[in-house]
Image: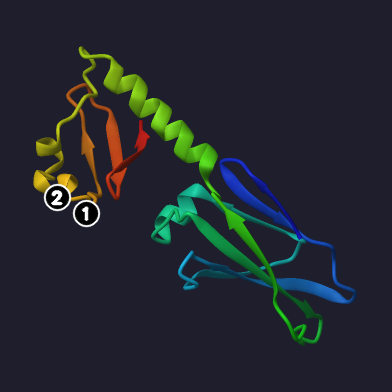
Amino acid sequence: MSVEVRKDVVVEWAPAAGSVSYKTLIKNDAGTVVRTGTVATTQLIYTYTEAQADGGPWPSLTVEVKAVDAAGNESPNWQSLVVNSPFQASQAASQTDLSTHLADTGNPHSVTLAQLGAGSMAQENIGVSGTFTTTDGKTVTVVNGVVTGIV
């Protein structure tokens, strides 16, 4: 199996003889299954948005694949691939956006922890999650204390 990491994680593998589909598992860094599925091709795309919906992103994830033939028989073993820093490009883009906004002291997108309702929570490193709107109508999404989107 091979992996390409960009905004999405794209995992590709060689086709198994006689297979018509592939079962897939995605596990977080704790080994918990966060997503299951079936694909008809030899490619799985796991998006940053899907990872957020699944409770991530995480420092690493494991993708497992098992072939299925036309009769529904599954290959006996899962093939595994560990992906480290799976969403580095997305996280870097969010960080760049945040740095740009914070550098502009007259920026209408600037927010305080009080606006997030965070107060001392962020100072204690607990993390804050939520969505809020800036004075100029931008929607800012924060997941576990990290700005993940400004639209």
Q: Is residue 23 above or below residue 87?
A: below
Quarter location, residue 89 = top right
Residue 46, numbered circle:
none
Q: Is residue 128 above or below residue 82?
A: above
Residue 121, numbered circle:
2
Tag 1, which secondary structure?
loop
Please provide percent x and percent y for residue 81.
Answer: 67, 64
Please provide percent x and percent y for residue 26.
Answer: 56, 67
Q: In terms of sequence position, does the residue under pointer 1 or pointer 2 come before the other?
A: 2
Question: In the displayed structure, does residue 73 sit left or right of residue 5?
Answer: right
> Distance of mark 1 from mark 2, alpha carbons?
6 Å
Classify the position of the C terminus by image quarter.
top left
Please provide percent x and percent y for residue 106.
Answer: 20, 12
Classify the position of the N terminus by image quarter.
bottom right
In percent of the image, x 21 and y 24: which residue is there? Answer: 110
Question: In the displayed structure, does residue 115 sit left or right of residue 77?
Answer: left
What's under tag 2, amino acid-wise? Met
In percent of the image, x 45 and y 69: which residue is there? Answer: 30
**Image marks 1 and 2: residues in contact by CB distance under 8 Å:** yes
Tag 2, which secondary structure?
helix
What's under tag 1, amino acid-wise? Ile
On the image, numbered disc 1 is attached to which residue? 126
Q: How is the image coloured?
A: rainbow
